[in-house]
Amino acid sequence: MTRASLALCTGVAVVSLAWGSAAAARHADSPGLDGLVSFDIPSMPLDLALLQYARQSGVQVISASSLLGARVAPALMRTTTPRMALELLLRDAGLSFGVIGANTVTIVRAQPAPAPRQFASSAPAPRRTTAPAPEPDGPTAPSGVDELEEVVVTATRQVDTVNRVPLSITAETQKSLDQQGVSDLASLRNLIPALQVTPGVSSGVSYPAIRGIFAVGDGVAATTGLYLDDTPLQKRNPSTTGQAGGTPMPPLFDVERIEVLRGPQGTLFGASSEGGAIRYITPAASTRP
């Protein structure tokens, strides 16, 4: 007597046919995987559908129980080959099968289809053309106009750009001074806010003042520091009649830049800088011509 059975062996579910002597003879005449068989399998859990498939086709099915899970097989009501019937039962479950004998198959996971191979074309590659750059919407700077120059200062005893120094400071390079026709400190006051320069009695000396802070009287100290690099040039007003007063003013020639610091600078530049400080920075020595 023939019956279908589902055996579990070390985690593998085996759907097989057990037959007696008469059934074995009939199984020997099985059409195999490619003969025609009339299937009548309604939609049901996949493991039960495989039992019905094995009973009706005479094909032994071997599968790991973890593959079947709770999947549901579609209904199969047609006459077709066992090979095609098994493909239809497994199609929606993402499974496939391999043949390991004349009437024995094993269930495996379906392999993804390989990507189609691309063959090099003999047609010539298209020529690439470069589109002209679009015209800017706004006005452009005329040719020959210099870009803004970044001025580096050392007013805080550290090298930094002028827009990052936390001081009220104005810095002019020698190139900027030449372009604006500035040759001495007296003409520089037209560029520096809050800078006032009063000529002294003697030639080459002046009384600079920043923010209106200046000293009046004999023997008083200057209120605006004047430095050639780190050398102070300011001095006290004379206390003796007949002596020349004022601070010597070097010409603005062959300097790297001039820095004007507005506001008290006593922390970094000491006395005589209540109103601010003026620094002449000379170029660093170079061995190149």
Image (tube, helix red, strand yellow):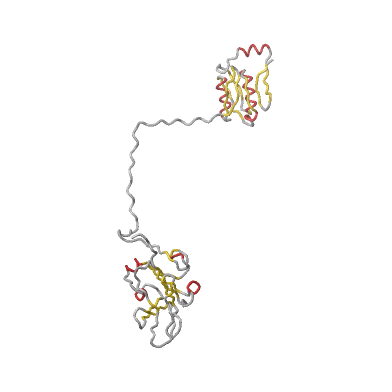
Q: Closer to the camera, 222 or 212?
A: 222
Instruction: Identify the residue shown where x is 67% and y is 15%.
Output: 19
Q: Give left or right: position of 6 versus 265.
A: right
Position of residue 274 relative to residue 86, above or below, is below
* Residue 26 % position (x, y): 63, 12
Task: Indicate the quadrant where residue 277 lies.
Answer: bottom left
* Residue 276 % position (x, y): 45, 75
Quarter holding the N terminus is top right
* Residue 229 % position (x, y): 42, 70
Q: Closer to the camera, 164 or 92?
A: 164
Q: Give left or right: position of 288 versus 4.
A: left
* Residue 198 % position (x, y): 37, 80
Task: Indicate the quadrant where residue 144 lies.
Answer: bottom left
**Residue at the front extreme, as displayed:** 287
Task: Indicate the quadrant where residue 119 lies.
Answer: top left
Q: Closer to the camera, 158 or 50?
A: 158
Position of residue 77 relative to residue 23, above or below, is below
